[in-house]
């Protein structure tokens, strides 16, 4: 789960990490008010979940409250298109109004869990302000890492090593070590999947300041962090995906094709989308229906497809293991009874309780297209979608 | 022969009395797996599905000689369950549970270092040695004893691959789901090591997916240490970057996580790449015929 920059910074501040003076605002007038309270040059930053805001015009430096109001007015209520969003962009409803920081140097600092060592790793670089992937490509020698043993936590020697890696000296070493220790505590306390400060600014006075911050949280751990879960801004997410979640379908991702897919299991669901493309079609979504004990989620998946005007045909591919094929079949028949289904539906069933499932479909008298195997199902749905497009 | 589980496996089920635990324990027993004990704190001394239930793993092992654990413990308590089984020195834990927080697994992996316990999973379908032992939630009937080893990050896609193999008359030595999480207890390299050493495994099918770099590590290992043919497929070539595709580990971050990079690495290491997920069985047949 993601949160906005202003929320991430509030959490950093709670852990004693220095951040610029500033406040979130929802209106231009309020932005003006905040700017005059700060009383110096300020930065107006669009609060969106996507990165690449600077290049997309989502960050403005202004000289006075009047300019602040004007800049905020140009951002609030618009949609920001960055290289990380689709062409439709993401809505801007809030801006962060912040004191413009004097910058001597820009550094990079992050923590994430490394998949190979299976340990949290602290990554720093003295080339801050640009994406770390770019630094890794162009100047890997500027990056220093330290793996953290969760049994003893982040140690001062690691802080010193990394601080020297960022070319800090004197009193900054202790200050940086304290900052890193705090960030590690935040990372572990709140079940972060990423904690990133970029840039971490060295001011002309030699102080450290977290000028931009990003925190991502582990979805699987949200059950023990209600305070974090409440920060979620649904407006930043795809409406179809929010709808899916409200209907109990947790693994739905919108894609850009016109074939609706309902599959059990994430790997198979990805493979179904791959196979559809191999056969010349394009999936409108990724949908892993998970393990079912009732028919409701099947009916809701069909509601999703009916609500999505892009859909030309639907493929149901279920290999029953934990999920029972007869429950899925019953759900499909119920969906037909509850709503008008305006597109062709291709069904491939295999696995647990297959015969019972097949019988339910056959007895319903509804004209589904049945597929004999995985390959056949993809070919048939691509063909059906092609027919429906004409 | 087979790897990790066989006729000598004496299975203990952690979370045996829950609905999933009950359902799948019954299926495992029907397949012929020796389920010797269940563990549910507070229900020790009772019997469930005819199996004696204990309060602790330690007691269950001492009284029944259990040598492997199949875990259905809910995500919030799963790490504790793994700690418990490992502290009792059980040789193998197969963790089915989906949705365990990543930082819980960081602590688990730290604890397992230097211990004798091997962990498979979490968020996986388990291990199947056809005709010998089913320690997992996979459909038993689709398997056929034979000499192809299957290792995969996916559950249901693996069922499809196995049924492709079986319908072509190609049997399996052992099928292992290593799970869809970012941190897997056993990696592709761990399992490839075992398949390479297993004299009854002639070829290996490796099913990867987007996210992480486990497939690249497997490629590196294959080029150096695996002499048996490897057939592979990597799911998620159509997945958009930055989106989590169901599995916690299936998310493209940076270029290394893409399907095309993984396929390239595996292909360069000498693995045969199936053209699409529906032709993995046919690709295996071709490779076996050329041996």
Image (cartoon, helix red, strand yellow):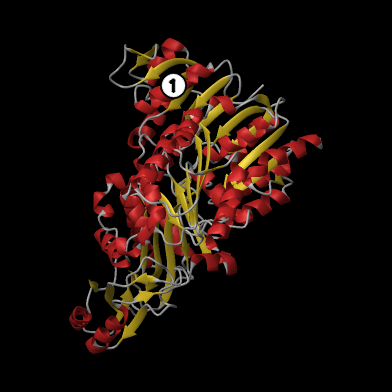
Q: Is residue B121 above or below residue A341?
A: above
Residue A7 in the image: state x and y as whole percent: 28, 63
Query: What residue did someone put label 1 on?
Result: B25
Which quadrant is home to the N terminus of chain A? Answer: bottom left
Q: Residues within 10 Å of mark 1 (few under 14, many from 20)?
A: many
Asked where in the image residue B282 lies, by quadrant, the reply is top right
Q: Is residue B40 above or below residue A337?
A: above
Residue B28 visible within the image: yes
Q: Along the line of sight, which residue is nearer the eye, A1 or A99?
A: A1
Residue A184 in the image: state x and y as whole percent: 36, 53
Residue B181 in the image: state x and y as whole percent: 47, 43
Q: Along the line of sight, which residue is nearer the eye, B29 or A232?
A: B29
Residue positioned 32% across, 49% down in the render: A247
SS type, badge 1 = helix
Residue B235 visible within the image: no
Which quadrant is home to the C terminus of chain A? Answer: bottom right
Tell which residue pokes out farthest to the right in this image.
B290
Task: Determine whether, in the image, residue B39 is placed left or right of residue B150.
Answer: left
Residue B140 in the image: state x and y as whole percent: 55, 25
Q: Along the line of sight, which residue is nearer the eye, A362 or B9?
A: A362
Q: Chain of mark 1?
A: B
Task: Determine whether, in the image, residue B263 is placed left or right of residue A12.
Answer: right
Q: Along the line of sight, which residue is nearer the eye, B163 or B189?
A: B163
Asked where in the image residue B281 lies, by quadrant, the reply is top right
Tell which residue pokes out farthest to the front in this image.
A365
Residue positioned 63% across, 43% down in the render: B278
Total numbered badges shown on the rendered structure: 1
Asked where in the image residue B173 lies, by quadrant, the reply is top right
């Amino acid at each position: 789960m993601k949160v906005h920059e202003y929320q991430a910074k509030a959490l950093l501040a709670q852990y004693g990490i220095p951040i610029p003076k500033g406040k979130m605002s929802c209106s231009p007038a309020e932005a003006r008010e905040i700017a005059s309270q700060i009383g110096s040059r300020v930065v107006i930053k669009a609060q969106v979940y996507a990165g690449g805001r600077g290049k997309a015009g989502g960050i403005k430096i202004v000289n006075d409250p009047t300019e602040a109001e004007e800049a905020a007015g140009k951002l609030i209520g618009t949609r920001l298109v960055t290289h990380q969003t689709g062409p439709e962009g993401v809505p801007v409803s809030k801006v962060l109004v912040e004191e413009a920081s004097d910058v001597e140097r820009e550094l990079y600092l992050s923590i994430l869990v490394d998949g190979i060592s299976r340990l949290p790793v602290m990554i720093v670089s003295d080339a801050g302000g640009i994406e770390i992937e770019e630094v890794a490509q162009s100047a890997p020698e500027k990056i220093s890492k330290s793996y953290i043993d969760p049994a003893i936590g982040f140690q001062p020697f690691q802080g010193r090593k990394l601080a020297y890696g960022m070319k800090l000296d004197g009193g900054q070493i202790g200050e940086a070590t304290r900052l890193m220790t705090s960030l590690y505590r935040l990372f572990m306390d709140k079940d972060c999947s990423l904690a990133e400060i970029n840039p971490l600014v060295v001011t002309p006075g030699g102080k450290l300041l977290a000028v931009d911050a990003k925190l991502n949280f582990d979805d699987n751990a949200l059950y023990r962090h209600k305070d974090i879960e409440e920060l979620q801004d649904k407006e930043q997410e795809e409406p179809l995906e929010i709808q899916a979640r409200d209907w109990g379908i947790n693994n739905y991702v919108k894609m850009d094709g016109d074939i609706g897919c309902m599959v059990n299991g994430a790997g198979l669901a990805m493979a179904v989308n791959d196979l559809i493309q191999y056969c010349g079609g394009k999936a409108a979504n990724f949908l892993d229906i998970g393990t079912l004990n009732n028919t409701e989620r099947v009916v809701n998946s069909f509601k999703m497809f009916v609500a999505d005007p892009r859909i030309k045909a639907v493929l149901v591919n279920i290999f029953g293991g934990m999920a029972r094929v007869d429950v899925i079949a019953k759900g499909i028949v119920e969906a037909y009874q509850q709503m008008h289904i305006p597109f062709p539906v291709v069904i491939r069933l295999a696995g647990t309780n297959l015969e019972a499932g097949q019988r339910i479909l056959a007895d319903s008298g509804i004209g589904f297209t049945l597929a004999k195997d995985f390959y056949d199902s993809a070919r048939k749905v691509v063909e059906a979608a092609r027919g429906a497009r004409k | 022969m087979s790897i990790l589980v066989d006729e000598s496996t004496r299975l203990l089920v952690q979370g045996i009395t829950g609905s999933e635990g009950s359902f799948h324990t019954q299926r495992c027993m029907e397949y012929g797996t020796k389920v010797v004990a269940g563990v549910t704190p507070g229900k020790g001394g009772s019997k469930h599905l005819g199996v004696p239930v204990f309060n602790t793993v330690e007691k269950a092992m001492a009284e029944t000689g259990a040598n492997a654990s199949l875990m259905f413990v809910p995500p919030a308590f799963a790490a504790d369950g793994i700690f418990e089984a490992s502290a009792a020195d059980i040789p193998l834990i197969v963790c089915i549970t989906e949705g365990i927080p990543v930082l819980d697994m960081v602590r688990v992996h730290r604890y397992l270092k230097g211990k004798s316990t091997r962990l498979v999973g979490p968020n996986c379908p388990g291990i199947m040695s056809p005709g010998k032992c089913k320690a997992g939630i996979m459909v038993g009937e689709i398997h056929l004893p034979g000499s192809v080893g299957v290792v995969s990050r996916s559950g249901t896609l693996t069922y499809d691959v196995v049924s492709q193999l079986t319908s072509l008359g190609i049997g399996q030595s052992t099928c292992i789901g290593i799970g869809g999480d970012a941190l897997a207890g056993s990696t592709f390299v761990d399992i490839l090591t075992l398949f390479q050493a297993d004299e009854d495994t002639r070829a290996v099918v490796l099913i990867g997916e987007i996210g992480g770099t486990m497939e690249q590590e497997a490629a590196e290992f294959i080029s150096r240490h695996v002499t048996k043919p490897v057939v592979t497929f990597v799911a998620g070539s159509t997945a958009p970057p930055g989106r989590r595709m169901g599995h916690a580990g299936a998310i493209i971050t940076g270029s290394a996580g893409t399907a095309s990079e993984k396929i390239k690495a595996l292909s360069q290491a000498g693995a045969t790449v199936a053209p699409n997920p529906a032709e993995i069985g046919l690709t295996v047949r071709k490779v076996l015929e050329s041996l």
